Amino acid sequence: MDVRSPMPSGAGTSAAPTAGQQGLIARQSPVWAAVVLGVGLLVSSAALWSVGSLKDQFATLEQELVRRQQTSADQAGEARLLARQAQDQTRDAAAKVSLLENRLAEVALQRTQVEELMQSLARSRDENLLTDVDAGLRVALQQTAITGSAEPLVAALRAADERLTRVNQPRLERVRRAIAGDLDRIRSVGVADVGALLIRLDEVVRLIDELPMLNQLDARPQAMGPSTNVAATVPAASTGGGSPLGWGQLFSEGQSLVHQVWNDMKGLIRVTRIDRPEAMLIAPDQAYFLRENLKLKVMNARLALLSHQSDVARADLMQVTQTLGRYFDLGSRRTQVVLESLKQVTTQSQQVGVPKPEATLAAIAAATAGH
């Protein structure tokens, strides 16, 4: 191989090689050719070796790439499988969460219903209690109106307060305060004892038959002094021996007969002072009807007291009092007892009505409406 050094284009023109230089060059050409050939072979072998090495590396890389591709494909498949499983699990979890939410909603609804039911039961219990208390108070009011006594109403209020105390509900405190106020008001009012008044009237009815009337008063006993003296002197005259016994006895008998006739005549005619002439004009058979009329008046007053018509009762008792003062003996002890009893009944029958528990009834109505 002829290896020549390139020369610049201007060198050939400036100077030509000499002969010695050309000979030297001719001697050195085979050596350089061998060197160049060796270098070329080395370079070629190195190139071939590098190409083979690169080929092996490329094969190794290709195998590694295939392996990694296969691994990636397997991992991708596993990832897709895991993703699918995750999606399925997510769907299952979502379904379970939805089911749990539905059950939670149902539990919340049931809890709300249970709370409402408990509140309803509590409200119904309180409402039933208030209804019972209201009914008891109204029945007690009717009993008070019938008997005229405040005891039924007081007992009903006490029982209602005890029941509310056992329940111990704060929203019922207003009702308890109203009950306490009504109890104080009812206890402060003076109410007549109708039972005692009725007993007095029954005693008056019993004593009417025993009262002495003015037209039935007995006459005072007449003095029998003269006849007694005459009768007493007869034995003395007869024992004195001045006159025969027969004439003295006849004289004394005749004198006693004259005195007896005279006393009988004085009993037939009696002159007395009469301040109330209408009392003396009642016949004995009419006295019975007068007493019965008085009994009826007293019984009417008794019925009026039972029905709480105190004005009617007082009017009947005043008429009875006037009749007793007109036709009966006011000096008699029994008459005075009857008049005193009638006076006491008339005074005590002017009673004050039992107040109604308006505050308690209003508090019960407000509590029932509030529930």
Image (cartoon, helix red, strand yellow):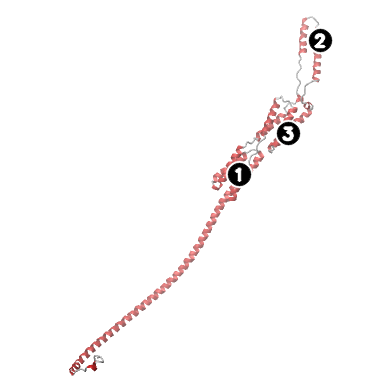
Asked whether residue 158 is in view, the answer is no
List x then y, in percent, for residue 336.
70, 27
Helix, strand or loop at mark 1: helix
Query: What residue would you read off at disc 3?
Result: 297
* Residue drawn at 62 percent across, 38 percent down: 151
Give the mark nearest the N terminus, 2 or 1: 2
Amino acid type assigned to the residue bearing label 2 in the image = Phe
Amino acid type assigned to the residue bearing label 3 in the image = Lys
Instruction: Please state which of residues 363 and 163 is positioned toward the viewer in this rendering.
Output: 363
**Separation of disc 2 and disc 1 at Cα?**
97 Å
Q: Which mark is residue 251?
A: 2
Helix, strand or loop at mark 2: helix
Query: What residue would you read off at disc 1?
Result: 359
Give residue 73's quadrant in the image: bottom left
* Residue drawn at 60 percent across, 44 percent down: 359
* Residue drawn at 59 percent across, 49 percent down: 368
Tag 1: Cα neighbours inside 10 Å, few (<14), some, or many (≥20)?
A: some
Instruction: Please state which of residues 300 and 43 is positioned toward the viewer in this rendering.
Output: 43
List x then y, in percent, for residue 205.
71, 31
Tag 2: Cα neighbours inside 10 Å, few (<14), some, or many (≥20)?
A: some
Give residue 50's quadrant in the image: bottom left
Which residue is farthest left?
A: 20
Amino acid type assigned to the residue bearing label 1 in the image = Ala
